[in-house]
Image: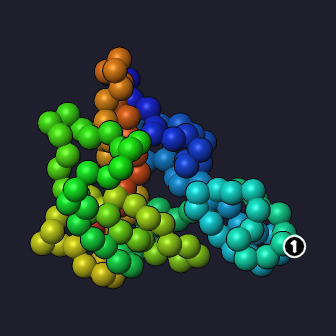
Amino acid sequence: MTTRLVDESLFENGEFHGEDPPRLAGARCSACATVVFPRQNSCPRCPEGTMAAHVLPARGRVWSWTLQAFPPKPPYRPPSGGHRPYHVGYVDLGDVLVEALLAVARAEIRIGLPVRLTTVPAYRDEDGTEVVTFAFRPERDGER
């Protein structure tokens, strides 16, 4: 089975090998050190600097979250079997908050929960290719 990333520009090398998840690729301003995700060509805070690639940390903490109980607007593609509610929220990665899927059980989810970058299936293309996206899951004790 073939697997690909939902959008290669969101990830550090734009590659997926199925082992460790690829790191998220943001950008940092050379003048004011503002970090953004996804990457962009100009700083949202100042006109002085240039934006350079900046790999984001793989670990963070849930800053806020909610349950996405209804299907989002297009271009959302529901998984086979239709839409199933899922958690979405902001993850604090230190220099930037990233909006992301949260692969966390309802009983575990809370503000401040330590989480780690992962990938999850998003949908299947017409040719059967599994398309994955990034998400954050609970960090387990002892993980590197």
Q: Residue at coordinates 44% horizontally, 32% vertically from top-left?
A: 4
Residue under label 1: 48
Considering depth in this image, is 13 or 128 the residue closer to the camera? 128
Name, please, the residue furthest toward the front. Answer: 73
Considering depth in this image, is 86 or 32 the residue closer to the camera? 86
Q: How is the image coloured?
A: rainbow
Name, please, the residue furthest toward the bottom. Answer: 112
Residue 66 place in picture, x, y as percent: 27, 71
Badge 1 density bin: few <14, some 14–19, many ≥20, Cα 10 Å: few
Residue type of the residue flagged with mark 1:
Glu
Q: Is residue 143 left or right of residue 79?
A: right
The reply to whether residue 82 is visible in this rendering is: yes
11 shown above or below 44: above
Name, please, the residue furthest toward the right. Answer: 48
Asked which secondary structure carries label 1, the reply is loop
Q: Is residue 20 left or right of residue 87?
A: right
8 shown above or below 69: above
